[in-house]
Amino acid sequence: MAVHFKTSTPKKLLATYKKLVDEGRVQTWSYDNDGDFTHTADQWTKKAWLRPKVTEGKELVFYVLAPRDTNLASAVYAVYHGRFIESLLRHCDKLFEEAYASAMPEDGDVV
C-alpha cells in the first residue's frame, strides 16, 4: 500500500512538493509536523496519511498510515494513491521518472 517514485533526486522531489504545498500551489494536500501528508478534501481528510521515506535505491516512497483503531478501506488507499500520484505528476513531473502504487501492505505501512 505504498506509493513509489523513482528519481535520482528524492530529497529534492520531497522538498519541492512541500514548498508547493506551503505556497498554496498544491491545495488538495497538506502535511503535518511529522511530515506526513493527508488529503484535504472534506470527504477524505485524515482518513489516512502518507509518510515519506527516501530509500537508498534512488526512490522516494510514501507509506500508508491508517488512523488508530481503524481498518483502512481499499477505497481510501485507492483514492490516496491515485490522487497523490496525480498531484506529483501535475506539479513535479520533471523530478521523477516513474511512479507506481502497491496494492498490498509493505514493510513501512502502518495499517
Image: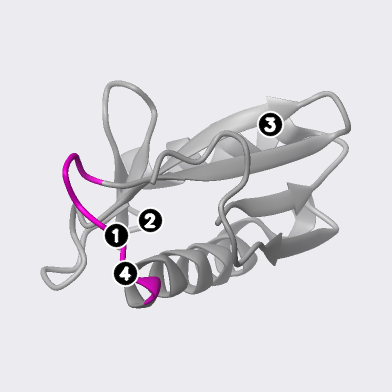
**Marker disc for residue 27:** 1
Which residue appears at 63% of the width and 67% of the height? Answer: 89
- Mark 1 to mark 4: distance in Å? 24 Å
Which residue appears at 21% of the width and 67% of the height? Answer: 44
Three-letter code, disc 1: Gln
Decide: marks 2, 4 in contact (CB < 8 A)? no
**Marker disc for residue 12:** 3
Q: Is residue 76 visible?
A: yes
- Mark 1 to mark 2: distance in Å? 6 Å
Front position among marks 2 and 3: 3
Q: Quadrant of residue 34?
A: top left
- Mark 2 to mark 3: distance in Å? 17 Å
Q: Which type of secondary structure does the marked residue at label 4 adopt? A: loop
Residue identified by numbered label 2: 25
Front position among marks 2 and 4: 4
User: Is residue 72 inside the magenta stretch?
Assistant: yes
Residue range (magenta)? 67-74
Name the spot of residue 93 as percent of width and height, x first: 71, 62
